Image: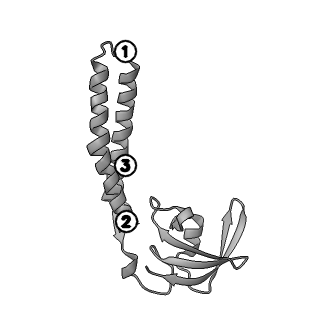
Amino acid sequence: MATVDKMPMLAEGYERLQTEVKHLKMVERPAVIDAIEEARAHGDLSENAEYHAAKERQGQIEAQIADIEDRLSRAMVIDPTTLSGDKVVFGATVHLLDENDKPIKYQVVGQTEADAKVGRISYSSPLGRALIGRQVGDEVEVSAPSGDKYYEIEKIEFI
């Protein structure tokens, strides 16, 4: 019997996926159906580029909907404000010092929510995996394409 892996995510990420799938179903899907009907009206489908493009777009939309619905069905929504403890876990905001004592702050989030530019890293990223289970004062080494990086955990928050 196959097991379904739960996909941890924040409530914000869950809501974003719900909004995205609703947009695809309510806006994109009807628009492509209209485009297919319009292209069909042009006659011979074998050499109708608009028809083939619309059918291809329809397949992409349906695949996107299926993918998002799968993620939503496996979602395990976690609220970081209900968490506590002295170890880094999913949802924790971690204050780090790099090897030059420059402060950096990351929140450990799900794969679909990760965006390092805004301080969100996936729990499955190299740094995310290295941080999980660590405590304040621990030193973390991460192998990156640009070389090994070293960090010290300065503070852990659940906000």
Q: Of the two numbered discs 3 and 2 on the same chain, state the one appearing first in sequence.
A: 2
Q: Residues within 10 Å of mark 1 (few under 14, many from 20)?
A: few
Q: Position of residue 113 (x, y in %)?
A: 45, 61
Identify which residue is drawn at 33% across, 46% down. 65
The disc labelled 1 sits on which kind of residue? Ser
Q: Residues within 10 Å of mark 3 (few under 14, many from 20)?
A: few
Q: Quadrant of residue 103?
A: bottom right
Q: Of the two numbered discs 3 and 1 on the same chain, state the one appearing first in sequence.
A: 1
Q: Quadrant of residue 17?
A: bottom left
Q: Of the two numbered discs 1 and 2 on the same chain, state the one appearing first in sequence.
A: 2
Q: Nearer the viewer, residue 1 or 31?
A: 31
Give the numbered dot on residue 46: 1
In this rendering, the answer to whether 37 lies above or below 127 is above
> In this figure, what is the number of numbered marks?
3
Disc 3, SS: helix
Q: Which residue is mark 3?
A: 67
